[in-house]
Image (cartoon, helix red, strand yellow):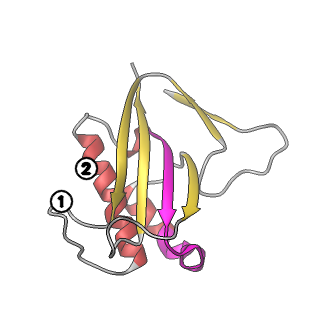
């Protein structure tokens, strides 16, 4: 379905891929925040919101008969980069509970704010389902 692109001699990235080559049906998931399907926040905890945002991505992919294993790209927008780094271990555990040990291409951007005041993270994703 897809091939990880890892330049020869480069250190292996941790928790993401440097590049992915893919072919198939493309699915684009809007930026998902840490609220549930009824647009209600169940927590103001950073890791809990990340886990919910990831679950929202997985739930949206399921509408297209796709799963987390089809994700090829994610962009994370966080309000607090320091919290992201300080809680990396907890975040990794939450990520694996929802996505598994699948690590697509990722980017992380610290932003001044998000549209929803209580949102601490927003994650968008692209998936490719094989032909």
Q: Which mark is residue 74?
A: none
For this view, does 53 lie left or right of residue 125?
Answer: left
Circles 2 and 1, Cβ within 8 Å, touching? The answer is yes
Q: Is residue 119 left or right of residue 59?
A: right
First along the sequence among labels 2 and 1: 1
Q: Residue at x 42, y 56 (%)?
A: 123
Q: Which residue is mark 1?
A: 37
Image quarter where the C terminus lies is top left
Towards the viewer: 59 or 111: 111
Q: Position of residue 125 (x, y in %)?
A: 43, 46
Q: Is residue 110 above or below residue 82?
A: above
Residue 101 vs residue 87, the one in the foreground: 87
Magenta residues span 71-91
Badge 1, how many Cα within 10 Å: few under 14, some, many 20+? few
Q: Position of residue 75 (x, y in %)?
A: 50, 52
Give the spatial CA distance, label 2 vs label 1: 9 Å
């Amino acid at each position: 379905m897809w091939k990880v692109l890892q330049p020869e001699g480069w250190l292996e990235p941790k928790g993401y891929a440097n590049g992915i080559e893919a072919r198939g049906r493309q699915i684009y998931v809007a930026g998902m925040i840490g609220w549930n399907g009824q647009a209600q926040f169940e927590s103001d905890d950073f890791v809990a919101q990340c886990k919910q945002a990831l679950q929202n991505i997985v739930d949206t992919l399921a509408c297209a008969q796709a799963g987390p294993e089809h994700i090829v790209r994610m962009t994370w927008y966080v309000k607090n980069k320091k919290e992201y780094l300080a809680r990396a271990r907890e975040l990794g555990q939450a990520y694996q509970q929802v996505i598994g040990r699948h690590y697509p291409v990722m980017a992380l951007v610290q932003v001044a704010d998000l549209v929803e005041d209580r949102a601490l993270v927003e994650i968008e994703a692209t998936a490719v389902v094989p032909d």
